[in-house]
Amino acid sequence: MGAAIEEIDLLDLKTRITQTDKADIKQVYDNLMRGSRNHLRSFVAQLESQTGQVYKPQHLTQTEYDAIINSSIESGGYGGVAQTNGRRGGWR
């Protein structure tokens, strides 16, 4: 179920990113898409390791799905260090 939700999230975000020309909003959508791709990889890996089942994409094309699954985990836009409130390492 989690993998299917991430697929839907990716499709929704892909649509939304084309509906804005604001760079900051596009960056947020890009970050959310990166997280959804990472979550999809994780859900698929857990399903296979715990049950032996191979997940089949339900909403993405097989090509889109394969591209995500066969790529590496993606880190955040700041070298993997969270940035909030203009500072590295969290709110202060």
Image (cartoon, rainbow, N blue to C red):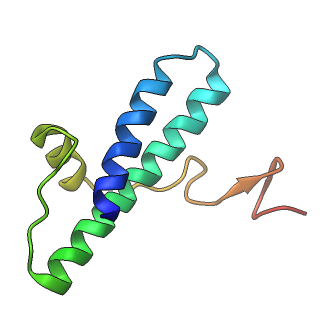
Work out which quarter of the rendered image holds the N terminus and state it: bottom left
Work out which quarter of the rendered image holds the C terminus and state it: bottom right
Question: Where is residue 82 drawn, in percent x and y?
Answer: 66, 58
In the image, what residue occupies the spot 55% across and 59% down? 80
In the image, what residue occupies the spot 78% across and 63% down? 90
Question: Where is residue 37 drawn, in percent x and y?
Answer: 36, 52
The number of discs equals 0
Q: Residue furthest front?
A: 1
> Can you say whether 46 is above or below 26 in the image?
below
For this rendering, which residue is in front, 69 or 6? 6
Q: Residue furthest bottom?
A: 50
Question: Which quadrant of the view contains residue 27?
Answer: top right
For this rendering, which residue is in front, 68 or 6? 6
> Can you say whether 62 is above or below 14 in the image?
below
Whether residue 84 can be seen here: yes
In the image, what residue occupies the spot 31% across and 47% down? 7
